């Protein structure tokens, strides 16, 4: 009896450890309205079922050579059958939830809801859209910005051997001028080990009009980024501080003073279970200090540009 209890405790501990490791890397939101949560849930059910059913089968196999072999064989059959039923039942439940969610959220049943996802109002094009000076038209796309940024980093002999450029180059409005901005990242795990205590020392901006690339050095390095391997990884940092939030694409931006931030838009679903995708607010994380704050849409400061990604806006317009 004691051995059986100990086995169950060990299996429970092993399941918890494996699930924590999986959660550490996958980082699903603990939110019933997230499809990623349901995928992780079914993985957890399968893992626990396999461990406990496998333990029961292994224990019964050890009894096969003895006089209770017939009963051991029946136990094997019963454990395997129960495990298969639990796994198949879990998969069926998740499929059913997805099917129900898809039906509930169909546009044919929610035409008004989809219509109201975006506000439509009459306007005057000539009055609402200001004319732009032809000399101030942005001419730098992401690929061009990347080439200019790599060239600028190559000029910095103290950095080029330790850091690389991330390919994001977020388009922002910086002090009323169009810019693309991106952060540096560690060249590899060994360069991370050499530099992580000080953090990433700079980011790169590219003026989209003049095509001038600048490497902006920081008094204190960026400690929270996608290049970190443990808790300071920005995705992990966000998830552990906001376990139930469903995040959209993460963006790197700078405020009007040049302070680097990570902008994490927060998704909500206006229709059904997970239909009518919309943005309810965003989490702003200071990339240097790690200070963070969730802000609803009407409280987000004007310097933040990347809250609604273009694909979502086009989807709502359609």
Image (cartoon, rainbow, N blue to C red):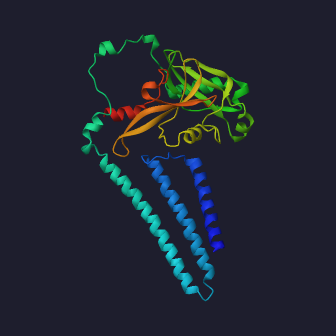
Identify which residue is drawn at 46% across, 46% down: 31
Above or below residue 309? Residue 255 is above
Instruction: Classify the position of the C terminus by image quarter.
Output: top left
The picture places residue 176, in percent across and down from the top left corner, at 48, 15
Would you place residue 42 above or below residue 157 in this image? below
Where is the N terminus found, in terms of image quarters? Answer: bottom right
Residue in view at x 41 percent, y 38 percent: 268
Q: In this view, does 1 lie above or below 209?
A: below
**Number of numbered discs on residues:** 0
What residue do we see at 58% from left, 55% from top?
19
Q: Residue furthest bottom?
A: 67
Q: Position of residue 47 (x, y in %)?
A: 54, 61
In this rendering, position of residue 4 left or right of residue 94 = right
Furthest residue in direction front, as rendered: 1
Q: Based on the displayed image, in which of its 4 quarters is residue 184 positioned?
A: top right
Question: Percent x, y for residue 135?
Answer: 46, 11
Q: Residue furthest right?
A: 194
Question: Where residue 284 sits: x, y (%)?
Answer: 53, 30
Between 255 and 200, the one nearer to me in the picture = 255
Say which of 51 and 194 sits in front. Answer: 51
Question: From what the image shows, is residue 112 above or below residue 16?
Answer: above
Pick whichever, 253 or 116, lies toward us: 116
């Amino acid at each position: 009896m004691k051995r059986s209890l100990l086995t169950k405790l060990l299996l429970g501990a092993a399941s918890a450890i494996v699930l924590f490791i999986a959660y550490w890397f996958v980082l699903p939101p603990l939110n019933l309205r997230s499809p990623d949560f349901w995928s992780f849930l079914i993985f957890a059910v399968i893992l626990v079922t396999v461990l406990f059913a496998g333990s029961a089968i292994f224990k019964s196999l050890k009894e096969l050579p003895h006089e209770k072999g017939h009963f051991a064989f029946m136990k094997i059959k019963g454990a395997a059958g129960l495990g298969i039923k639990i796994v198949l039942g879990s998969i069926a439940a998740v499929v059913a939830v997805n099917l129900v969610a898809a039906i509930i959220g169909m546009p044919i049943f929610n035409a008004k809801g989809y219509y109201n996802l975006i506000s439509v109002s009459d306007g005057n094009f000539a009055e609402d859209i200001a004319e732009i000076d032809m000399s101030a038209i942005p001419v730098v796309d992401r690929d061009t910005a990347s080439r200019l940024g790599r060239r600028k980093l190559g000029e910095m002999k103290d950095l080029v051997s330790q850091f690389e450029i991330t390919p994001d180059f977020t388009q922002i409005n910086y002090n009323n001028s169009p810019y693309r901005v991106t952060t540096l990242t560690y060249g590899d795990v060994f360069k991370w080990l050499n530099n992580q205590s000080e953090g990433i020392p700079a980011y790169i901006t590219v003026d989209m009009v003049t095509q001038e690339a600048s490497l902006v050095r920081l008094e204190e390095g960026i400690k929270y980024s996608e290049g970190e391997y443990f808790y300071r990884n920005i995705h992990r940092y966000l998830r552990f501080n906001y376990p139930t939030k469903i995040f959209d694409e993460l963006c790197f931006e700078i405020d009007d003073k040049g302070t680097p931030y990570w902008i994490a838009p927060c998704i909500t679903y206006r229709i059904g279970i997970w239909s009518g995708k919309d943005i309810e607010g965003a989490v702003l994380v200071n990339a240097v200090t790690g200070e963070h704050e969730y802000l609803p849409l009407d409280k987000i400061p004007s310097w933040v540009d990347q809250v609604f990604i273009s694909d979502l806006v086009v989807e709502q317009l359609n």
